[in-house]
Amino acid sequence: MAGFPSVKPARRTEKIEYAVRDIVLTAQEAARRGRELLFLNIGDPIQYDFETPRPLIEATYRAMCENLTGYSASSGVDEAIEAIRNEARRHGFEPVDIFVTTGASEAIDFALTALVNAGENVLVPYPGYPLYTAILAKLEAQPNPYYLKEEDGWQPDPEEIEAKINENTRAIVLINPNNPTGAVFSREILEAIVEIARRHHLVILSDEIYDKLVFDGQKHYSIAALAPDVPVVTFNGLSKCYLAPGFRIGWGIVSGPKEVVEDYIEAIHKLARARLSTSHPKQYAIPVALDGDHDHLPQVLEKLRRRRDLTYKMLNEIPGISCVRPEGAFYAFPRIEVPGVSDREFVRELILETGVVVVHGSGFGQVPGTAHFRVVFLPPEEVLFKAYTRLAEFAEKFFRK
Ligand code: PLP
């Protein structure tokens, strides 16, 4: 009898790449070679010296003790939805609909799946968080990249965005503050993007999961507040600003004219109903997080600011590497300025030789012909210092080759 043939994965998975996790294989190889690994690759504060605020854990525990352990309403419990509505109002916009999800990741998946047909395209930032291109691949839709550049301080270029629109374009994705560049977008740029969405009838998908992690007194603007007449879905969650990524709690907020977004909202709700609900007890952490005193934040911001300053200083001291100063989130996206260097090769060798784990820039998209890598500056300063010292020694040898 012939053997069972190998199970063929669906073609739609072929284009899905998630560099942040894929790099782990190289790190394992480095560990086998006896390297001490320094992880500057994981956007998870709990892997470093940060802790989930106790009140979020207590609220979840209380809910569990009160037997709130069945499925919840598909789009979330009332207390959480009310807290998210109030938070949106503090950001200056009025929600038409709110849906609570398994991380912002699921909200992003719902918003794209309910909107984009196979063959259509969505404007996505390169560099940008790779989940968007992964979901578009699953939908057999195309990412339509618009490029963020150092010379613009990593701000989007509205003219380029407009030039890329074609008859199959459905939406513009914004990640603000940005992963992986750390840029926080100016009000003028956001207004210019709103104008483009208005003119071309595009939905704006705004990922604001780092909204409270902004340095130097800079102001973060929610684009929905600048676009009451445009359909916008704003994503946020407990993973980053509230230090609870393992809770897997996020949400999407739909805003814009009610009659314009009505059908879209119903499509999102269908998807939400089909998967029953997100984790019920953990939703009770949402009001505690959003309406709480945020007293963990000053300390988090102070730690991150110092780590950002060290990152910016030490990376710019390395010949052949330059780095724009991150204004928010906990990422830097330094550029390898030596011509002809492949970022994949640089990062692979760096990990194997030094144990310093960063992610190659091509995993996030980048201007063709340029080379970058992403650094997570969540680790304590002594770890960062050690990592950048090893990186400097490595780069000196690597660039001479
Ligand atoms: N959006 C951005 C820009 C991110 O960087 C991340 C995680 O790194 C996510 C969304 C995923 O968030 P969640 O943990 O809420 O699914």
Image (cartoon, rainbow, N blue to C red):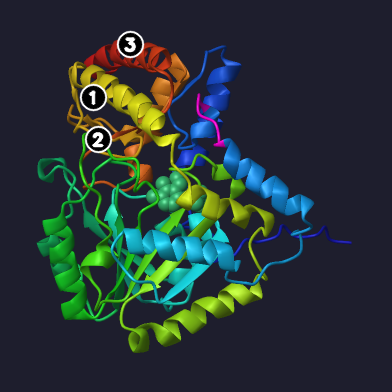
300 sits to left or right of 272: left
67 sits to left or right of 224: right
Residue 178: image location, x then y, percent: 30, 47
Q: Secondary structure at mark 2?
A: loop
The mark that comes first in sequence, 3 or 1, is 1
Determine the residue positioned at 15% across, 72% down. Answer: 195
Q: Taking 189 as reference, is 34 above or below it?
A: above
Q: Which mark is residue 326?
A: 2
Asked if the residue under mark 3 is in contact with the one under mark 2, i.e. CB atoms within 8 Å, the reply is no
Q: Which mark is residue 312?
A: 1
- The region drawn magenta spans 48-53
Q: Amino acid at mark 3?
A: Thr
The mark that comes first in sequence, 2 or 3, is 2
Q: Nearer the viewer, mark 3 or mark 1?
A: 1
- Identify the residue position indicated by label 3 in the image: 389
Q: CA distance from mark 3 to mark 1?
A: 13 Å
The residue nearer to you, when weighing 351 against 296, is 296
